[in-house]
Amino acid sequence: MTTPVLAGADAGNDTPVAPRRRLIRRHSLVVRLTHWLNVTCLSFLLLSGLQIFNAHPRLYWGQYGADADHAFFEIGNRADGDTLHGFLRAGPLRIDTTGVLGVSNEDGSPTARAFPTWITIPSYHDLGAGRRWHFFFAWILFFNGLIYLGHGLLRGHFRRDLLPDRDQLSPRHLWREIVDHARLRFAHGEEARRYNALQKLSYMAVAFVLLPLMVLTGLTMSPGVDAVFPFLPGLFGGRPSARSIHFITASLLVAFVVVHVAMVILSGLWNNLRSMITGRYSITDEDTSP
């Protein structure tokens, strides 16, 4: 009479069998191509946008925004004798940022500049060149976004992969995911096949709120576009407000990217990169026997 072999064990020695790893298809070609093009466009948009912001590093709310108007956000500098001091001001809060923002050390001497040369495109002060870089990649981002949206709607990508299930939206489930992320506990096995609720909500917010808002506010700042669509400035409370929303949206996108990259690294850098390059993602079939 033969002895049955326990699941997860080798015959005769009860040695547990290593969980089987297999590759699943996770990202389509269109999603991968638009993702990497977005990465390229947003990188150039950020660096050229900082060059543009350097021309007037103040943010306003309302219909008016000039030197004599009250700014709720400012990166500036002040002279104290022969010494320049940089500062960042947000409402009543004022922080000294000498050497980083407002005043940076360039060629061994302090220079009055909101953002330093090493983080702007071009590195030297040139508003015209910065605008040309910015507009070029802005239009690429716009058309790339249309391709992504069209593909997502026609192929059911949003409904299938990004729309949270009802059970995922329950307060208890969301709180559990927040705790798991804080403890760096990530999904394994079949649970890793789909995005968790926090991923779905953040990706949907980026795709359907932040990026469209950034595009619309960017278009609103163009006098030529305003002439064709005169309702745009009023939609955002004025062009100065649109500029402020544009800057805030860009800052939120940067924060998203920082968190996103951190999670990619912590949850498995190579596996995540492979899924966005080849479309294949490795999962582990864990033993579920008693």
Image (tube, rainbow, N blue to C red):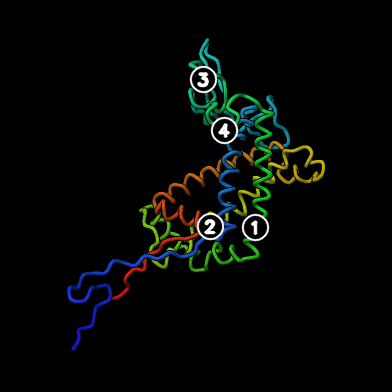
Q: Tell me the kind of residue under disc 2.
A: Leu
For image coordinates 59% across by 41% down, the residue present is: 248
* CA gap, disc 1 and disc 3: 43 Å
Residue 159, x across and y down, in percent = 59, 66
Labels 1 and 2 touching (C-beta < 8 A)? no
* CA gap, disc 2 and disc 4: 30 Å
Q: Using residue 40 as the reference point, say whether residue 231 is left or right of it.
A: right
For image coordinates 53% across by 57% down, the residue present is: 201
Q: Using residue 188 as the reference point, say whether residue 168 is left or right of it.
A: right
Residue 272, x across and y down, in percent = 45, 54
- Residue hosting label 2: 201
Q: Which mark is in front, 1 or 2?
A: 1
- Residue hosting label 1: 149
Q: What element carries label 2?
A: helix
Q: Which residue lies furthest to the front in this view?
A: 278
Q: Is mark 1 on a helix, strand or loop?
A: helix
- Residue hosting label 3: 106
Between discs 1 and 3, the one toward the N terminus: 3
Quadrant of the rendering where the N terminus is positioned: bottom left
Q: Using residue 139 as the reference point, say whether residue 19 is left or right of it.
A: left
The image shows residue 203, relative to residue 40, as above or below, that is: below
Q: Residues within 10 Å of mark 4 (few under 14, many from 20)?
A: few
Res 173 label = none
The image shows residue 220, relative to residue 25, as above or below, that is: above
Q: Is mark 3 on a helix, strand or loop?
A: strand
Residue 203, x across and y down, in percent = 55, 55
For image coordinates 73% across by 36% down, the residue present is: 63
* CA gap, disc 4 and disc 3: 29 Å
- Residue hosting label 4: 91
* CA gap, disc 3 and disc 2: 42 Å
